[in-house]
Each structure stands twice: as C-alpha cells, then as structure tokens.
Amino acid sequence: MRRETKLTSPPSSTTFPRGVLFDKGVIRRVYERRVRLALNLPPTVLQTEAANVYARIVGRTNKLFITEQTFNILTLRTPLFAAPFLADTQPLLKGRYLRRWARRLRDAGFSPEDAIVIAYGSFGVSRDRTSVGLDVIVTTDLKMAARYDQNFNVIQARFNHMRMNLTPAYAAHRLPQVVTSADVLTKF
C-alpha cells in the first residue's frame, strides 16, 4: 500500500515543529554546486535541484539538521564553502535507542547507512538536547525513499512494537517522512 507523501506545516506556523534532516547527498550536491560556481563552471541539474531544495527549506524553518557524520565531513572541507552549512544547520547526536532502531531497519532491508539516517529521524537528539526526532528527512537517494514508502506499513508496525517496550518517555516518538528533492520541489 503506497502512502501519499505530503509536506505540510502547522496551520499557525510556517515552520516544521520538530525539524528537517538533510541527508549527506543533498548537502554534498549543494556544496559541489558552490564549488563549481566559484570555478565559473555550470552546476549540474542535480546540484541545482539540491540547491533549490536547500534554499526553499532554509527559508521556511530554522530547525535544520545534519547527521554527525555529515558535520564531521563539512568541518574538513574548505571553510569558504562549508561555513554556510555549518551556520544554517546543527548536527544531531545519537540518542538513546537510535542504534537499536537502525538495527531493526537493517533487518527490514535497508543498508546500514540508510538505516542510520532514518533512525536519526526518530531518535536523533539536538545538540542542546531540547528536541528528539524530526518530521522530515530530505534525501537524494531515490531507492531509500522508495523502499521506505513501499514498506511503510511494515516499518510502522516494527516501530510501534519497539516503542511499546521502551520507557514511557519514548511513547510519543514517531516516524519521520522520508522525501526526495523532487518531492520538496513539487509538493512543498
């Protein structure tokens, strides 16, 4: 059963309540676009698409996140091109149960890297520890998004089963939406 992907914001606000996670593919393409423009080279179509997605979301919320791994990669890159990402986003920390959920996602057929990204959506913790989990993961990985969408009911059942066995503080946790760059541009 295919579920409809919708990106909506709360009626009284133009921001997402719990934030947006950019996967490394989005960040990489926007970074590469900035480098190509600095070298007076035209960006690729995918780089332009990622930059448009990034600009659209940055304009709507200040709750922007990247994984710790993406943060570490950016700190090693040329500061001129990496600094805007580091200023706009904050890295998520691995929260309690993140690895357990990632293991269950791997059992559902996700690669280890995809499982971790999706697990950050439910159990990633902001650096200031004021928020846990996100509403939306934006990815350039079409296969990950399709697998998540196609298997959503199974993933939801696994998530609910795991949540029942956690401490009450985790009872309100929910699954994020996983959307592609194209989804953001056409539906948001």
Image (cartoon, rainbow, N blue to C red):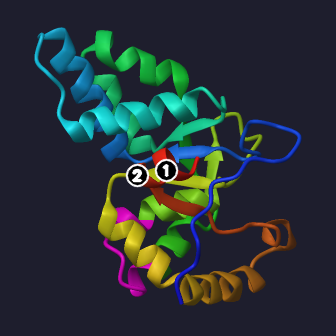
* Residue 103 x, y percent position in the rendering: 45, 77
| Residue at horizontal 64 percent and vertical 48 percent from the top | 125
Looking at the rendering, the stretch of residues picked out in magenta corresponds to 105-115
Describe residue 165's horizontal placement relative to residue 5 as left or right. right
- The amino acid type of the residue labelled 1 equals Thr
Apparent side of residue 45 relative to residue 143 in the rendered image (left or right)? left
Amino acid type for the residue under numbered disc 2: Ala
Tag 1's secondary structure?
Answer: helix
Q: Nearer the viewer, residue 9 or 98?
A: 9
Left/right of residue 22 with respect to residue 171 in the rendered view? left
Mark 1 and mark 2: Cα distance apart in space: 6 Å
Q: What is the quadrant of the N terminus in the image?
A: bottom right
Query: Label 2 neighbourhood size at 10 Å, few (<14), some (14-19), many (20+)?
Result: some
Q: Quadrant of residue 83 in the image?
A: top left
Q: Residue at x 70, y 34 (%)?
A: 128
Q: Secondary structure at mark 2?
A: helix
Residue 135 drawn in magenta: no
Q: Which residue is mark 2?
A: 182
Q: Residue 145 bears which disc, if any?
A: none
Q: Position of residue 158 (x, y in %)?
A: 60, 87
For disc 1, the neighbor class at 10 Å (few under 14, some 14 to 19, many from 20) is few
Residue 80 screen position, x and y as percent: 31, 9
In this rendering, is residue 79 above or below 112?
above
Q: Which residue is mark 1?
A: 186
Residue at x 44%, y 62% (from the top left corner): 116
